[in-house]
Image (spheres, helix red, strand yellow):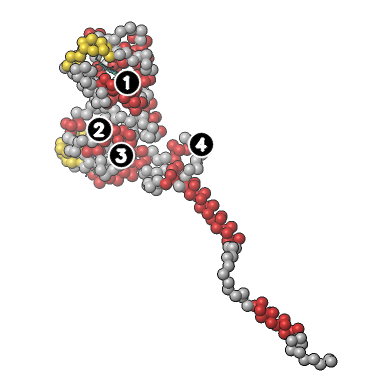
Amino acid sequence: MSNHSDPQHNSDPQDVLKVTAAAKREHPDPAEAQHPLPSGLLLLFGVIVCFAGVYLGVYHGGFRGNIYNESESTPDLLSSKKLAAPGVSQVAAELTLVEQGKAVYANCQPCHQASGLGIAGQFPSLVAADWVTGSEKRLVAILLKGLVGPMKVGDTVYNGAMPAWEKALSEKKIAAVVSYVRASWGNAAPEISEAKVAAAKKEFASRVDPWTEADLLAIPANAVLEGAAAPAAPAAGATAAKSAGGSGAVDLDAGKAQYLVICVVCHQPTGLGLPPVFPPLVKSEYVTGNPERLIAIILNGVMGPIEVDGKPYNNLMPAQGAVLTDTKISQVASFVRSSFGEGASPIQPEQVAEARKKYGSRPAGWTEAELKAFPQ
Ligand code: HEC
Ligand code: HEC
């Protein structure tokens, strides 16, 4: 009764342990099932994605193609985080036109030299040269189209050729390099904004030949380029230089907008008028001449026979004094003078205020005889 030997029930407990230990060592049979990612890994990925998102959010730079272009970009563009108080720091962080121009001058250096002094007899000096520090319009014209033939620089006549840069350099780079040469080596002329270069490029778009000295001298020395107050352009230097010049900047873009609303109906977009009904503003002494007279015309209108550019008119121009403020009149008059009047000087709101005091109460428009009585 004691010695049963049933293999089923007589197993040694040690054997059982051995078997289960072996079973425990085995990996379970592979089976089709979905196991969740380990949570630690998930957390790590989550952190990486968040970091990447934030990084891109801060440094996307507006996804601009030129963001790493040293002359077209600024640290401010790269980071949407404002570095400090906006305004102050933004101007400080941005390279001025003059600073950018130094790099662009590498194009000019082979001929005009690092000193700006050129090479006597071959390449003229840019130092204390009228062409550089004088008329901004002539200077930009030279850069855009190049130069040929004899030209007097200082007391020396050069007879060479200077390449055109319109195709090789962007408007911004041309603005930068002319601003740089105007502010270097003792030159101290105000900088020229990108908007002005753009305006000149448009104006001279149809010209293919390089300039000769005579062509350049035909551009009035005091011609101002449009875009003086374009919001894209101003850098601290330009504004400072302008106010130092005594006359505030008149917003020619605003003047153009007034012109296109008010005057355009009669004087046309081209300023050529519609002879024999509406006189032209182009080639008109009333536009280029005495500023006070032009203001008076806009304030009170014109009536009766009047000769403009050799043709007679006999019609009526309505007074605009009641409709337009002093500032608006100064803007539209400045625009008309700069665009149709061979770049005659801008007109300030103070000049309009003064004229309004004198003529504001005049009941009727001006006659030709009265206009002729203004000093030229
Ligand atoms: C290949 C040589 C060459 C290069 C490069 C060159 N210039 Fe000139 N530049 C000349 C010559 C030659 C003249 C005189 C042309 C003439 O005699 O008609 C001149 C004339 C000028 C003048 C008018 C005269 C004066 O000295 O004031 C200006 C301004 C000027 N260059 C600016 C520049 C600027 C800015 C650059 C660079 C973007 C440049 N030039 C690049 C050869 C060059
Ligand atoms: C309703 C049509 C009309 C409008 C609008 C008008 N003008 Fe005139 N303008 C005339 C006419 C017509 C004359 C000539 C009057 C005459 O025959 O006596 C004239 C004359 C002039 C003259 C002098 C002659 C000349 O051609 O140089 C100037 C300058 C002038 N206008 C500027 C302006 C300006 C700037 C504006 C916009 C602020 C303006 N005008 C708006 C019709 C208009």
According to the picture, the residue beneath numbered tag 1 turns out to be 262
Distance between the alpha carbons at the discs numbered 3 and 2:
14 Å
Q: For the residues carrying marks 4 and 1, which lies nearer the camera in this image?
A: 1
- The crowd level at tag 4 (other Cα within 10 Å; few <14, some 14-19, many 20+) is few
Distance between the alpha carbons at the discs numbered 4 and 3:
30 Å
Label 1 CB less than 8 angstroms from ligand 2 = yes
The image position of residue 343, as x and y in percent, is: 26, 25
According to the picture, the residue beneath numbered tag 2 turns out to be 203
Distance between the alpha carbons at the discs numbered 2 and 4:
39 Å
Question: Quarter of the image holding residue 357?
Answer: top left
Distance between the alpha carbons at the discs numbered 1 and 2:
23 Å
Q: Nearer the viewer, residue 66 or 184?
A: 66
The image position of residue 320, as x and y in percent, is: 33, 15
Mark 3 or mark 4, which is nearer the start of the sequence? Answer: 4
- The crowd level at tag 1 (other Cα within 10 Å; few <14, some 14-19, many 20+) is some
According to the picture, the residue beneath numbered tag 4 turns out to be 85
Residue 60 visible in the current orientation: yes
Q: Say what secondary structure mark 2 lies in.
A: helix
